[in-house]
Amino acid sequence: MREAHGTSEANILKGMLAGALGGLVASWTMNQFQKVWSASEKEITGGRQGQNGGQQNSEDAEDATMKTADRISELLQGRHLSKDEKKKAGPVVHYAFGAVMGAVYGASVEVNPAANALAGIPFGAILFAGADEIALPALGLSDKPIAYPLSTHVYGLVSHAVYGVTTETVRRIVRG
């Protein structure tokens, strides 16, 4: 049985592994949710480009994961990725980031069980604020938050809430 506050190293490691698995599943679930949201938005607007971060729907536009993959390639290999390489590497960045954030979350819950409050929704909201609203613009991987309409922020927040709930659900199942 786990200790009340889960402070042993073994529990933290198990929490990290459960959280990483949760983060991977949650990254996939978040993608599926975004596809449904975008299709619904397209249906509602009669096919007009929606406000969900519109560039994500453009074939030629690069999202933050593709830009990140390109920067990593430039740092490690000294070269930029081709458009096709970016399209392949972007999801790798998305899933890797999702797994790492899930591992951090899993460890956090082991140290402080209250960290899983509201089924992971606050975790998703904090991740949205920290990544989408602060880190990506600061790193030049997206425009400043004010450049996007409110609907884009709602889309991002809800998407990350789905990620948070899924991460917590999988983590809880794996940890028993």
Image (cartoon, rainbow, N blue to C red):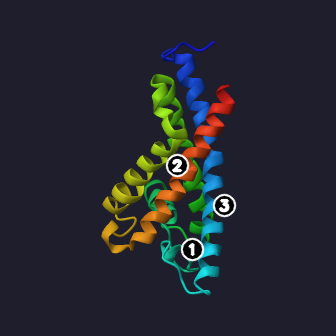
Q: Position of residue 175 (x, y in %)?
A: 65, 26
Percent x, y for residue 10? Answer: 57, 17
Circle 3 packing at 10 Å, graded few (<14), some (14-19), many (20+), is few
Q: Nearer the viewer, mark 1 or mark 3?
A: 3
Q: Looking at the picture, how far across and down is residue 153, in whole percent? A: 42, 65
What residue would you read off at disc 1?
83
Query: What kind of residue is marked 1?
Result: Lys
Under mark 3, the amino acid is: Gln
**Residue plotted at (52% across, 79% down):** 50
Q: Earlier in the sequence, mark 1 or mark 2?
A: 1
* Residue at (57% x, 27% y) in the render: 15
Classify mark 3: helix, strand or loop.
Answer: helix
Compared with 47, 17 (above or below) is above
Distance Cα–Cα, label 1 vs label 2: 21 Å
Q: Earlier in the sequence, mark 3 or mark 2?
A: 3
* Above or below 19: residue 113: above
Where is residue 36 drawn, in percent x and y?
66, 67
| Amino acid type indicated by mark 2 | Phe
Q: Is residue 155 left or right of residue 39?
A: left
Vertical relation: 124 (above or below) 110: below
The numbered dot on residue 32 is 3
172 or 102, which lies in front?
172
Which mark, by number, is residue 97?
2
**SS state under label 2:** helix
Q: Residues within 10 Å of mark 2 (few under 14, many from 20)?
A: some
Task: Give the image quarter of residue 90.
Answer: bottom right
Q: Is residue 63 above or below residue 131?
A: below
